[in-house]
């Protein structure tokens, strides 16, 4: 069974690890995302994957709240 939900992700800590000469990217501190989850999917892992897919950067941590 697939469950579709909207999630507000806040307090995102991005893993940018830029060189000293590189400019730090301007990444959002919060995002609203939509996820399709299967029963056995790990919610936090799916959120992290979605954020990475949308921005190209990995995350170190975040808070989340299911909106619907």
Image (cartoon, rainbow, N blue to C red):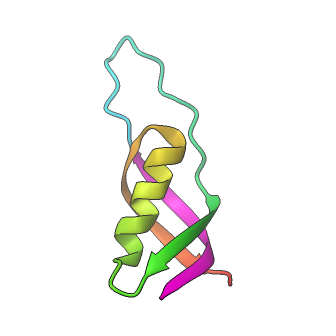
Q: Quadrant of residue 61?
A: bottom left
Q: Residue at x 60, y 78 (%)?
A: 4
Q: Is 54 in front, or is 16?
A: 54
Rendered location of residue 66, percent (x, y): 60, 82
Q: Is 2 in front, or is 41?
A: 2
Q: Residue at x 49, y 53 (%)?
A: 51
Vertical comparison of 17 with 21: above or below: below
Q: Is residue 4 left or right of residue 45?
A: right
Rendered location of residue 64, percent (x, y): 52, 74
Q: How many marks?
A: 0
What's drawn in magenta, residue-wise?
Answer: 1-14
Q: Is 58 in front, or is 36?
A: 36
| Main secondary structure along the magenta-highlighted residues | strand
Q: Residue at x 45, y 65 (%)?
A: 47
Q: Is residue 45 left or right of residue 13?
A: left
Rendered location of residue 65, percent (x, y): 58, 79
Rendered location of residue 48, percent (x, y): 41, 59
Residue lying furthest front: 1
Residue lying furthest top: 21
Vertical comparison of 62 with 43: above or below: above
Q: Residue at x 41, y 15 (%)?
A: 22
The C terminus, quarter of image: bottom right
Q: Would you say residue 43 sits in the magenta stretch? A: no
Q: Is residue 22 left or right of residue 10?
A: left
Vertical comparison of 42 with 61: above or below: below
Q: Quadrant of residue 5?
A: bottom right
């Amino acid at each position: 069974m697939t469950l579709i939900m909207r999630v507000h992700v806040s307090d995102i800590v991005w893993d940018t690890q830029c060189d000293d000469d590189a400019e730090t990217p301007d990444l959002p501190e919060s995002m609203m995302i939509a996820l399709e989850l299967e029963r056995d999917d790990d919610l936090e892992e799916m959120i992290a994957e979605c954020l990475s897919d949308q921005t190209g950067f990995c995350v170190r941590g975040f808070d989340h709240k299911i909106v619907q």
